[in-house]
Image (cartoon, rainbow, N blue to C red):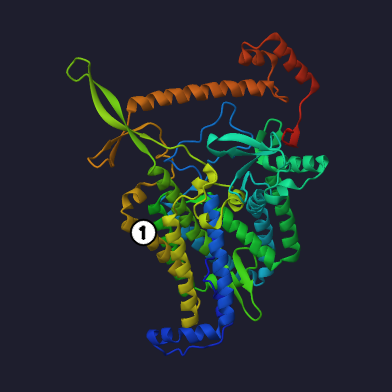
């Protein structure tokens, strides 16, 4: 992240060096602004390049912010069935992100400046930046594997959703559900809500392709392909005595890693501008997903810290322009035109992008927050101050959170079920309905970003000088969000919102005022102690289970005496199996990819 932040560029810093002089230097600001229409027409080729850059940055922030959605703390985890739900149930929605602290608002500009100045003097010392470019290309190729793999895998997931959706709507309004287990499609019959299976629709495809009339072998092949693409695969990795890991992925995730390796190999050998931009897309996408400002206060401080850093580095030092133009590595997006080129630093996408992503998650949080219910409960407290045990009973309110519905991965279902009149409010399934939550703060931030980018372009053309993009992006995005909160009367909720886990509580007791608004949260210390005890018991149980697993796994060097002590009540047959496994040996290194079981 420091590398990205250290090269924040104006939207057209490269093109500024090539543009012809069109504005007289001694004109006043008002006179220069008056000439803006003429300047835009004379530099229309540059404007077209900037339109491409603005559209690309907006799309990266949009898809990155939606990919960063996860269960908000105002919602309960989704309910699971007795056996963990259906086989086509969405994957776990909670994701691990790197939350930023208030101190990061101070450290980020310092780290960015240190890296930028270091690269500048390294370029001056080497005199030839080609050596540094080769070293940095290898470095970025290695660290980009995960980012490109993530972007490629998510793109393939979206494509798979369009080809193999879970639901689709026929012309008569009937909603068909595709079931992989029974290899058929069904709909609900009228008000009875009974499932009716349509025998004519034998393929797993939507629309008119559901009745292709293919041979049984081809139909079976389509169902198997759908099963392999949508179900989870198991990847196991083990090094004796060091690591023993297994995790679930989908086939598209595996294919995404393969594509990431291929992209890196081709980029390193060809230095293609297209592939360099693609790697930049991946860095931006992954950065918006993985980084979180945690709170609006931290995000605001971070953006304004980099705001002053960008102004100083662009206007008062040669560091930014020298590093940006001398290094040919995927730390910027470069768009080439017939006669000129224009570029945008990744930091101008990622830095505002993580704040805009926070706005979208806050919209998500407020959607469930407004659905919470306050249920009257009796709260009993014990008082021993008088020397006697006295139980006091008072009525309080308990917050009941709504159950969470995962809105991600619905692009294909949205395409096949939503008519033109309901593009913004799909309701064919609960997941589609959940994906249409109000996005007030997100759209406000996106509009602020768009206007700020346009302002950056206008100032560049008028003053004919490189402009630090964050000079306009930070006020445009931050002020748009805080003004929106003030107009909606939700500044208190914005200030209190955090993604550090403190809000993710269950059975919270609160105090309310006469209007039913929550004014305070009552902390039950006794209940917290009980929860801690239960957590300790769970941890102890987990430790015992892990101990048994370590003994049972092949390749454990624990002696038979220790095994008997750990396993305890293990049956004699189980001991014989353990001894037989030890006699067979153990794997020193193991890597395997297991396909999902057939239907």
Q: Is residue 303 left or right of residue 586?
A: left
Residue 324 against residue 80 in the figure, above or below: below
Query: Most extreme residue toward the top, as rendered?
Result: 572
Q: How many marks?
A: 1
Q: Is residue 396 left or right of residue 480?
A: left
Residue 83 against residue 216 in the figure, above or below: above
The C terminus appears in which quarter of the rendering?
top right
Provide residue 31's location: percent of width, then percent of height. 40, 87
Residue plotted at (50% across, 46% down): 433
The secondary structure type at the circle numbered 1 is helix
- Packing grade of label 1 (10 A; few <14, some 14-19, many >=20) is some
Provide residue 412's location: percent of width, then percent of height. 62, 50
Residue plotted at (27% across, 23% down): 380
The N terminus appears in which quarter of the rendering?
bottom right
Q: Nearer the viewer, residue 3 or 221?
A: 221
Q: Is residue 376 left or right of residue 366?
A: left
Provide residue 298's location: percent of width, then percent of height. 40, 53
Provide residue 203's location: percent of width, then percent of height. 73, 43
Q: Nearer the viewer, residue 25 or 453?
A: 453
Is any part of residue 399 visible from this angle? yes
The image quadrant that residue 327 belongs to is bottom right
Residue plotted at (61% across, 60% down): 281
Which residue position holds label 1?
484
The image quadrant that residue 478 belongs to is bottom left
Is any part of residue 96 visible from this angle? no
Q: Nearer the viewer, residue 494 or 280?
A: 494
């Amino acid at each position: 992240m420091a590398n990205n932040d250290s090269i924040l560029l104006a939207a057209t810093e490269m093109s500024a060096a090539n543009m012809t002089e069109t504005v007289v230097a001694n004109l006043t600001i008002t006179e220069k602004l008056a000439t803006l229409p003429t300047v835009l027409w004379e530099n229309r080729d540059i404007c077209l390049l900037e339109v491409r850059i603005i559209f690309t940055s907006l799309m990266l922030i949009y898809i990155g912010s939606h990919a960063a959605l996860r269960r908000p703390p105002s919602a309960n985890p989704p309910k699971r069935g007795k056996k963990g739900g259906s086989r086509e149930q969405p994957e776990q929605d909670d994701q691990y992100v790197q939350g930023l602290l208030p101190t990061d608002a101070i450290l980020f500009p310092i780290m960015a400046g240190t890296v930028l100045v270091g690269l500048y003097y390294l370029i001056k010392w080497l005199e030839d930046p080609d050596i540094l470019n080769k070293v940095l290309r290898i470095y970025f190729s290695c660290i980009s594997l995960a980012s490109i793999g993530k972007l490629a895998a998510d793109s393939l997931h979206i494509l798979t959703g369009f080809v193999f959706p879970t639901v689709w709507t026929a012309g008569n309004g009937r909603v068909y559900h595709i079931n992989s287990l029974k290899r058929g499609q069904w709909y609900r019959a009228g008000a009875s809500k009974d499932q009716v299976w349509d025998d004519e629709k034998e393929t797993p495809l939507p629309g008119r392709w559901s009745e292709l009339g293919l041979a049984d072998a081809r139909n079976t092949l389509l169902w198997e392909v759908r099963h392999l693409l949508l179900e989870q695969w198991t990847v196991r990795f083990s090094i004796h005595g060091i690591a023993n890991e297994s995790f679930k992925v989908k086939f598209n995730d595996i294919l995404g890693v393969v594509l990431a390796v291929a992209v890196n190999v081709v980029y390193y050998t060809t230095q293609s501008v297209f592939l360099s931009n693609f790697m930049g897309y991946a860095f931006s996408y992954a950065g918006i997903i993985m980084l979180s400002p945690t709170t609006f206060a931290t995000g605001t401080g971070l953006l304004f810290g980099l705001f002053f850093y960008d102004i100083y580095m662009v206007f008062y030092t040669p560091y930014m322009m020298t590093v940006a133009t001398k290094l040919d590595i995927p730390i910027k997006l470069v768009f080439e035109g017939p006669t000129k080129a224009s570029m945008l630093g990744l930091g101008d996408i990622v830095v505002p992008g993580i704040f805009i992503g926070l706005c979208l998650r806050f919209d998500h949080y407020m959607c469930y927050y407004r659905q919470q219910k306050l249920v009257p409960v009796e709260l009993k407290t014990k008082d021993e101050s008088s020397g006697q045990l006295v139980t006091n009973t008072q009525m309080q309110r308990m917050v009941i959170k709504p159950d969470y519905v995962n809105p991600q991965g619905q692009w294909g279902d949205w395409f096949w079920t939503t008519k033109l009149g309901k593009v913004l409010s799909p309701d064919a399934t609960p997941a589609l309905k959940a994906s249409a939550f109000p996005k007030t703060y997100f759209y406000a931030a996106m509009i602020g970003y768009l206007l700020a980018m346009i302002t950056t372009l206008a100032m560049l053309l008028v003053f004919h000088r490189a402009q630090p993009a964050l000079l306009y992006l930070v006020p445009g995005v931050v002020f748009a969000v805080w003004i929106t909160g003030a107009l909606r009367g939700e500044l208190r909720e914005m200030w209190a919102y955090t993604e550090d886990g403190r809000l993710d509580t269950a059975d919270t007791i609160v105090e309310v005022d006469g209007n039913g608004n929550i004014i305070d949260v009552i902390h039950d210390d006794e209940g917290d102690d009980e929860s801690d005890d239960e957590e300790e018991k769970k941890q102890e149980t987990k430790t015992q289970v892990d101990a048994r697993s370590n003994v049972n796994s092949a390749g454990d060097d624990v002696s038979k005496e220790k095994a008997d002590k750990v396993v305890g009540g293990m049956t004699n047959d189980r001991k014989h199996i353990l001894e037989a496994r030890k006699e067979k040996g153990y794997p020193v290194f193991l890597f395997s990819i297991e396909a999902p079981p057939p239907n």
